[in-house]
Amino acid sequence: MHNYTSIMINSSGELWSVGKGTEGQLGDGTTASKSSPVQVGSDTDWEFICSGQGRHAGVKTTGKLYVWGQEGNGYLGLGTTYTDRSAPTQVGLLTDWSKITAGSRQVLALKTDGSLWNFGRNNVGQLGDGGTANKSSPVQLGAKTDWVDIGSMDERSFMAINSSGKLYTWGYNTQGQLGHGNTTANSSPIQVGSLTDWATCGTGTGSHATKSDGTHWSWGKNDFGQLGLGDTVNRSSPVQVGSSVQWKPFDKVTGHSTLGIIL
């Protein structure tokens, strides 16, 4: 995925961005690119951010969801099409958003009530609703309200963990990134194996997740060794990375190209 823009939250809760800005993706109210970081507004309550291809989203400590950048065919979730936003724009009026993650042209969001929501492009079923129709406004994924964590594996594949410790994946699967032992795409969430000890999931060009025992597992695309398994072979099922049991949860930067595991 070619993003060319980086977004960051500092310890004061400020939002900063740098790089390409031609579609407003820097969020600073302009369409000029910047080679040094610029602050996005003056708010100090940013909590989670994620990055897609030319578009970004963020959740504040107030529980409000914001998007900005290139909209395309309704990919910002604002109910409109082809209207770029050069500054963060709130999605609806709700204040119960808790975490977000992004693919190239879609966002998966978790609410405080444990429900999953998404919007954006859906050409290979990456929204997980069983179809392939795009969504220009947030739509709930199923009726369950027991989800506790979310992540994305590449531009068009997603995962989520429920309160029972079960891991589910859906979307694109050409490199085995769904973890089902095959390369078949799924347009609805499918449980990965039968284990119930998954704790947190991350975001990257491979699939990454931690278990409750502190082990770290990876699978999927591995062309540059991003799975951390000592080779460049793709995996279609989860494989433990090393033998350490000291992996901490993934961080609050949940964009496609940022993997936030800390040892």
Image (cartoon, grey):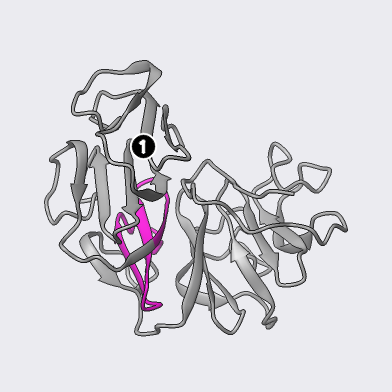
Q: Looking at the image, is 138 positioned above or below residue 23?
A: below
What range is drawn magenta here? 99-126
Q: Residue 174 location in percent, x, y? A: 57, 54
Residue drawn 47% across the image and 76% down it? 147
> How many numbered marks are there?
1
> Seen in the image, is 216 located left or right of residue 123?
right
175 and 231: which one is in front?
Answer: 231
Any part of residue 150 in sight: yes
Q: Residue 138 location in percent, x, y? A: 24, 64
Residue drawn 69% across the image and 78% down it? 197
Residue 92 sits inside the magenta stretch: no
Q: Residue furthest top?
A: 35
Residue 101 sits inside the magenta stretch: yes
Residue under circle 1?
15
Disc 1 element: strand
Residue drawn 46% across the image and 82% down it? 146
Any part of residue 73 in sight: no
Q: Looking at the image, is 213 positioned above or below residue 89?
A: below
Residue 241 falls in image quadrant = bottom right
> Seen in the image, is 182 located left or right of residue 39?
right
Residue type for callout 1: Leu
Q: Residue furthest right?
A: 243
Residue drawn 30% across the image and 30% down it? 26
Q: Residue 1 location in percent, x, y? A: 46, 37
Q: Residues within 10 Å of mark 1 (few under 14, many from 20)?
A: many
Q: Residue 137 location in percent, x, y? A: 20, 61
> Seen in the image, is 10 located left or right of residue 43?
right
